[in-house]
Amino acid sequence: MAEQPYVDEVTGVETTGHEWDGIRELNNPLPNWWNWILWATVVWSIGYWIVYPAWPLIDSYTKGVFGYSSRAEVAVEIEKAKAAQKGFLDKIEAASLEEIRTDPDLLNFALAGGRAAFNVNCSQCHGSGAQGFVGYPNLNDDEWLWGGTVDAIHATIVHGIRNDQDDDARVSDMPTFLKDEILEKDQINDVAEYVVALSGGTADQAAADRGKTVYEEQCAACHGETGEGLADFGAPALNNKIWLYGGDKETIVRTISYSRGGVMPAWGKILESVTVKQLAVYVHSLGGGK
């Protein structure tokens, strides 16, 4: 007579007869519906392999009965999108910057395209919100080294700053007053105190008074008599608290002593002209454009 299977006292389930170190295996086979689903998916996968591209080959892949390609489908959708955009792009190409800004439809299209171009090409230096970083200008405020009109912004984007790509790049070379022995350390200290005072900071008044004379002789020609800055020279204003490299005295001393020289690419040689126009309109719209 065959031995009766052991029944687990807790669950009431028969065991398989397998036992390890006193632990018995319950006999809980998968339900039939689960097995049917498993085999259905196997059959489905075989059909998928036959109908759609599936198997990689040495230099290609199996095309499948349908010859479907998601890449080809995306390419078609991109071409349709480009065709839909062409009318706007042609109008922007032919229009002046002011005409773009005063046409609601062109303006909305340019802002959307400019934002996309900014995120791809400009955000790495100026930040995703155009807030800028040390050495990279904030594009949201109303302080502009080379002018904040839409035309001035466009020119800056097209030609760039201090690059070797464009002969018309913006260039403003501040002297290295200490390195070139134009000023002595004491004079640089005094003029730094004066600049701190100009921007509303707390300064040594006696040193600032001495520094004013140095400023008038060496700095006012570019930065203005009252530190208002001159966009024609790319010289920043010094009479506010907006600083590209920092407005503490130590940083100002270093700037006067060794100068600064940021570089921006000539995007006119990298991007299409219509994209540059959209960028100029977008940057001008950020809040600081004049």
Image (cartoon, helix red, strand yellow):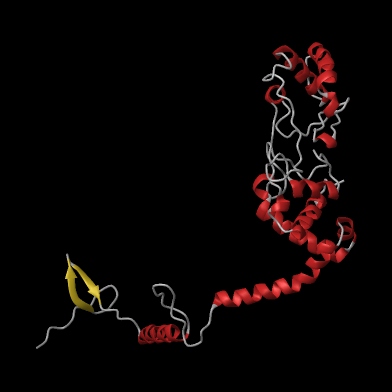
On screen, residue 45 versus residue 230, left or right, reads left
The x, y position of residue 197, in whole percent, is 81, 21
Q: Quadrant of the N terminus?
A: bottom left
What residue is shown at x 82% (from left), y 50% (from top)? 284
The x, y position of residue 116, in whole percent, is 70, 59
Q: Residue furthest front?
A: 167
Dividing the picture into quadrants, the one containing residue 217 is: top right
In this view, 164 is above or below 94: above
In this view, 281 is above or below 208: below
Q: Nearer the viewer, residue 49 or 163?
A: 163
Dividing the picture into quadrants, the one containing residue 281 is: bottom right
On screen, residue 156 versus residue 163, left or right, reads right
Q: Residue furthest left?
A: 1
Q: How many marks?
A: 0
The x, y position of residue 203, in whole percent, is 78, 18
Q: Nearer the viewer, residue 33 or 76?
A: 76
Dividing the picture into quadrants, the one containing residue 215 is: top right
What residue is shown at x 21% (from left), y 71% (from top)? 24
The x, y position of residue 149, in whole percent, is 86, 47
In this view, 91 is above or below 166: below
